């Protein structure tokens, strides 16, 4: 728990501030300890960096260090146990669709046009409460939207998509956004915060779910008198879905919410609004403040807003891009299209319940040129906008990102690496393997017996062979004086072993230029090419014909170098008319792994006509352990 959160906490019984007794912590964070107040009704444990109001203790003797350490192990388990659980879930293609698709649909994005009306009341270092953070996403999203404020997210306990273990291992101390804290407390109980502690309250999918007392009363109490409250995605009784599906919670007509808002804002400078969810979603970027309590739609957004001129958000320059998990990617047709059959029909089931978002999706396939393919893979691997713009000509990449975002294939959002990874876990995008690929691509093949490459003489190479080839190449590069961040040039054409040499070199931290027809003006110490009758001076042939002085003859003289750690994967640069592109190997491999569930099955062919497509084809073969073929 962040020590700054203490300033907004208060005992629900006596309303007095808590005193923190910390056992393990730092100047900014309490990792283990407990909270007590003067009334001594209960003791609130702090374990694994979380304040556990949902696990209150009767007295302080239950909160000694050994007892709290045991509680942490019982509630949160180990990182390995959670990773095993996530991998098993991903292997069975099991997702919770409302977690996987939540960042994209209208229910959450309807909030965005109201944010300019909220910004005027937010103080620097002021607090925002995220009152029902079921999937972990809304807290990270708010923390990214408001980096100068502090966000506190509530979740009710060990339940739903993440439970205690998911929150700990995906959004624990040091992983979540620096301005985000997470507190476990059921929102149907009196909230443990002092009155008027928050500038803004955000409670998605909650107002119809929890009784007006104490939830609505508590929300009003803890927000400043001139603060803002947003209740996105409220089930209304104005109409019913067509085709019909059951909706939970207490459904009130917009007129009832209108009367409530009139009562609670009477005599104040604030105004209350009932908005149609779809009107906000389809409307301008800054919403027109006009009440729509008689909306014919069945979902609404309830807001209490200050009387102030709207303030626009800063440009979205520091963002990441989430790949829409509802799309199927076809590498052979160079296109992507929404697919209702993904996740055993979960996409179709979801879109029936979200027709406003279904109408936003493109009907025709989204064409993917080379820059688009690179952008898609880097985005899936967790690249931020600056890394994407550095990967190609900046204006051209910027146009591509705007086009893919307009098509809903990518969603630009200001969040950190932890939130991006969290969403990949929700969307079952092979998140754990994707993260591993960012640091060491080929070492992941050490235990694989799958045949991936067959040489021209019929020799098969499995994953272990390729990992061994990469280790020997690392030793060879060191022997000839090539160090991390140096450049080499490779002209692979359609030869799989030369592509593997390029990837293995980049995996060792070397930068690699992919040359076309052995044409390169870069000054380097090593140039690799295929065998031939006339190998140009200054180039080293591969050596499948057994000649001496070749790459393979040199590698055969080396022992296995071992899988030594380096500074991290390097770049692979190549032509992509017009201009050149730079592929960070770690991010590109991570994207290949993340997109595995969304690629159409294909025969992996090296054609030689497009270096980028050949590069992605080889990476796909390595990630998926599929055979690679040359034409």
Image (cartoon, rainbow, N blue to C red):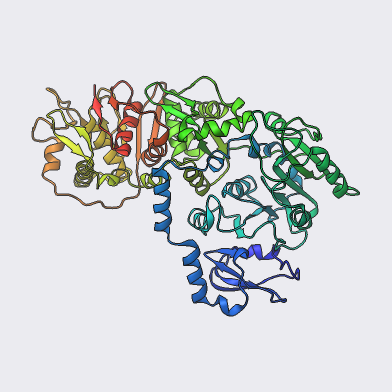
482 versus 361 height, above or below: below
Residue sitting nearer the eye, 511 or 333:
333
**Residue 492 at least partly seen:** no
197 versus 108 height, above or below: below
Residue sitting nearer the eye, 410 or 527:
410
Which residue is located at x 33 percent, y 34 percent?
Answer: 620
Q: Residue 1 falls in which quadrant of the image? A: bottom right
Q: Position of residue 361 (x, y in %)?
A: 57, 26
- The number of numbered badges drawn on the structure is 0
Q: Position of residue 371 (x, y in %)?
A: 44, 27
Residue sitting nearer the eye, 190 or 493:
190
Q: Which residue ends up furthest to the bottom in the rendered image?
A: 61
Q: Quadrant of the C terminus?
A: top left
Q: Residue 305 falls in which quadrant of the image? A: top right
Q: Position of residue 388 (x, y in %)?
A: 47, 35
Q: Position of residue 206 (x, y in %)?
A: 68, 48
200 versus 101 height, above or below: below
**Residue 76 at least partly seen:** yes
Which residue is located at x 39 percent, y 41 percent?
Answer: 590
In the rendered structure, the answer to whether residue 244 lies left or right of residue 408 reads right
Residue sitting nearer the eye, 202 or 163:
163
189 versus 208 height, above or below: below
In the rendered structure, the answer to whether residue 13 lies left or right of residue 608 reads right
């Amino acid at each position: 728990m962040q020590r700054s959160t203490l300033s907004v906490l208060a005992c629900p019984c006596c309303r007095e501030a808590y005193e923190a007794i910390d056992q393990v912590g730092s100047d900014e964070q309490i990792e283990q300890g407990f909270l007590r107040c003067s009334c001594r009704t209960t003791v609130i444990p702090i374990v694994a960096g979380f304040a556990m109001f949902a696990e209150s203790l009767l007295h302080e003797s239950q909160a000694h260090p050994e007892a709290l350490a045991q509680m942490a192990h019982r509630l949160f388990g180990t990182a390995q146990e959670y990773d095993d659980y996530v991998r098993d879930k991903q292997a069975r293609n099991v997702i919770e669709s409302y977690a996987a698709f939540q960042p994209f649909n209208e229910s959450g994005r309807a909030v965005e046009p109201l944010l300019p009306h909220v910004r005027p009341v937010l103080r620097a270092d002021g607090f925002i409460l995220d009152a029902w953070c079921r999937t972990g996403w809304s807290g990270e999203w708010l923390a990214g939207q408001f980096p100068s404020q502090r966000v506190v997210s509530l979740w009710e306990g060990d339940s739903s998509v993440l439970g205690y273990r998911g929150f700990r291992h995906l959004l624990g101390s040091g992983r979540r956004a620096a301005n985000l804290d997470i507190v476990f407390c059921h929102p149907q109980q009196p909230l443990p915060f002092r009155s008027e502690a928050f500038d803004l309250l955000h409670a998605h999918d909650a107002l119809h779910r929890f009784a007006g007392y104490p939830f609505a009363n508590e929300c009003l109490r803890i927000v400043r008198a001139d603060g803002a409250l947003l209740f996105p995605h409220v089930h209304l009784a104005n109409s019913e879905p067509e085709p019909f599906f059951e909706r939970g919670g207490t459904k009130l007509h917009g007129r009832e919410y209108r009367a409530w808002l009139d009562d609670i804002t009477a005599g104040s400078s604030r105004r209350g609004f009932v908005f149609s969810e779809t009107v906000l979603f389809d409307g301008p970027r800054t919403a027109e403040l006009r009440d729509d309590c008689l909306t014919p739609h069945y979902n609404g957004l309830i807001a209490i807003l200050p009387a102030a001129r709207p303030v626009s958000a800063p440009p979205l320059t520091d963002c990441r891009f989430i790949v829409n998990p509802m799309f199927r990617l076809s590498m052979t047709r160079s296109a992507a299209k929404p697919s209702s059959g993904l996740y055993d029909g979960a996409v179709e089931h979801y879109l029936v319940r979200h027709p406003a978002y279904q109408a936003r999706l493109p009907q025709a396939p989204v064409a993917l040129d080379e820059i688009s393919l690179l952008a898609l893979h880097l985005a899936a691997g967790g690249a931020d906008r600056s890394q994407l713009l550095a990967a190609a000509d900046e204006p051209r990449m910027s146009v591509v990102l705007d086009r893919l975002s307009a098509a809903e294939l990518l969603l630009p959002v200001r969040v950190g690496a932890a939130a991006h990874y969290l969403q990949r876990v929700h969307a079952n995008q092979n998140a754990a393997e994707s993260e591993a690929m960012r640091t060491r691509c080929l070492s992941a093949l050490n235990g694989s017996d799958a045949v991936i490459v067959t040489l021209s003489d019929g020799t098969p190479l499995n994953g272990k062979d390729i990992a061994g080839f990469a280790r020997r190449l690392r030793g060879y590069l060191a022997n000839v004086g090539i160090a991390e961040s140096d450049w080499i040039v490779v002209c692979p054409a359609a030869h799989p072993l030369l592509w593997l040499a390029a990837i293995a070199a980049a995996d060792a931290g070397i930068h690699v230029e992919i040359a076309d027809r052995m044409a390169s003006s870069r000054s380097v110490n090593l140039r690799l090419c295929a065998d031939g009758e006339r190998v140009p001076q200054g180039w080293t042939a591969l050596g499948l014909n057994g000649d001496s002085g070749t790459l393979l003859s040199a590698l055969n003289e080396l022992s296995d170098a071992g899988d030594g750690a380096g500074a991290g994967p390097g770049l692979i640069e190549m032509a992509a008319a017009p201009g050149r592109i730079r592929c960070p190997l770690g991010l590109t491999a991570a994207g290949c792994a993340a997109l595995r569930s969304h690629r159409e099955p294909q025969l992996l062919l090296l054609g030689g006509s497009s270096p980028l497509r050949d590069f992605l084809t080889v990476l796909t073969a390595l990630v998926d352990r599929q055979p690679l073929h040359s034409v």
